[in-house]
Image (tube, rainbow, N blue to C red):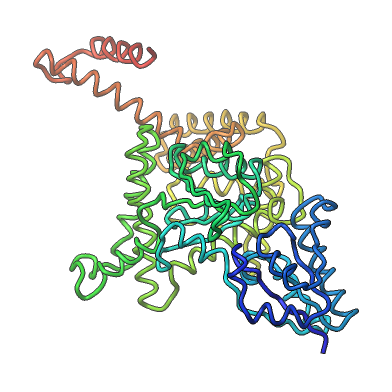
Amino acid sequence: MKTIYLLGLGPGDPEAITLQSLSKLKQIKHVYLRTARHPAVKVLRDHRIPFKALDFFYQHSDTFAEVYRRIAYFVLNAALHFGSAAYVVPGSPLFAEKAVEIILEKAGKAGIECRILPAVSFLEAVMAELRLPREKDLLVLDALETDKLLSAPEKNLLIIQAYNQRIASGVKLELLKLYPPEHPITLIRAAGLSRGKRVVTVPLYQIDRQRWIDHLTTLYVPPLAKYNMSDLLQVMRILRSEHGCPWDQEQDHISLKPYLLEETYEVLAAIDADNKDNFCEELGDLLLQIVFHSEIAAERQDFSFYDVIARIIEKLKRRHPHVFGSEKAKTAEEVLCTWEQIKKEEKKERTSLFTVEASFPALLRAQKLQRQAASVGFDWPEIDGAWEKVQEELKELKDAYNLGNAAKIEEELGDLLFAVVNVARFLYVDAEQALTASINKFYQRLRFVEEQVQKEGGKMSDYPLEKLDEWWNLAKRQQKR
């Protein structure tokens, strides 16, 4: 059967090549090295093992992804043509080798068997230099895949393939989005070698200033975050356990409803107050409610927190085909239209396109229902129609008032409020937030008037409206400063 042998040269020291790998390389006629830029290649030359280096793919490819794809297909074709071939990489073939992944994926379909020989990875050498125990929470990342560099700030990170200062600069810019500029980064070059080895710790902002960075360099990033999501889940499990908190043990989905609503409003209040510390704390309180409900559901074997995560990730990807798929959307309006259309496809079992949760506040329900109607074309073409509707409803309210019909007054007042919400939608204003801001403004001015009355030792009911208006206008002027 046609066979590809996948072997590793070890982290760098020629003596780290296993005897098994060396013996196999002596038997195989067609040996291909991903790169000849590795100290252990000396062993192949010393033992007069013929090989072909594939460095030329790096010189004639536009991206690293293309390099690895072309190398993989080259090796696959060699095995098909010659019957057997060896593909040799630095370190271990099972550690951060994209071409090996492609070979393993495609070989079976081509009728090729893959045999992997164990090898010492760069990880052992780097861990030895750092004196970092293997049981530490460790994640190996590729410097070329910058979108993954911020995925686990609570872990020890080893960033490989930082071939040069340019790539190190890209790593730095991505890490600076989360890590502070002074965060210590250790650069390890030629780990495990006696010559050319360098181990230097510098602040994050300086990592791309090290002129000696090359293909033998690995970056070590110590943890930034003290805790992660698993820690929070574990705390909740302890609180709910038989040895935990009696109050937490007694809660269920129904009993927690008021707290979920309360924490949501406290988050909104923190946003309005523009208090970063309070905002951070309140978001944590809201997250606790999500974890609390998820843990109760997990105990009932309904779903787990990880199911919650999976659902929202799948939904976000599904509803953003212009980001994760091939569709295009240039404006926020186009995105909303696509979003609503996808929602309709997801909810085909529903008998109506229009769904408004009864538990929503009235203004929020009005906004959502109006958006749903607009998404299918049931809407004023311009804001002028919405303005005219407000005037119409205002007149009808006045007419009902003049008739003294209480039921009609309530109905027309509701229609007027609904029409005003529609105008807010055309103006891209959230009616709920706008009303909340007005309430807060009214409250602050009213409190100012009350304080003036209290300074004079009286009661508000003792003062004429003219005097109260005077203080009210003073409060308005002070708010505008």
Q: Nearer the viewer, residue 399 or 239?
A: 239
Q: Position of residue 363 (x, y in %)?
A: 47, 43
Residue found 66% across the figure and 32% down from its top: 385
Quick one: which residue is furthest to the left in this view?
457
Residue found 69% across the figure and 55% down from its top: 324
Residue found 42% across the figure and 43% down from its top: 407
Residue 350 appearing in the image = no
Q: Position of residue 117 (x, y in %)?
A: 65, 80
Q: Nearer the viewer, residue 258 or 431?
A: 258
Quick one: which residue is furthest to the front in this view?
46
Q: Quadrant of the C terminus?
A: top left
Q: Position of residue 213 (x, y in %)?
A: 61, 45
Quarter assignment of residue 458? top left
Residue found 37% across the figure and 47% down from its top: 283
Viewed as shown, does residue 360 lie left or right of 42? left
Residue 361 vertical placement versus 347 (above, below):
above
Q: Nearer the viewer, residue 43 or 456?
A: 43
Q: Quadrant of the N terminus?
A: bottom right
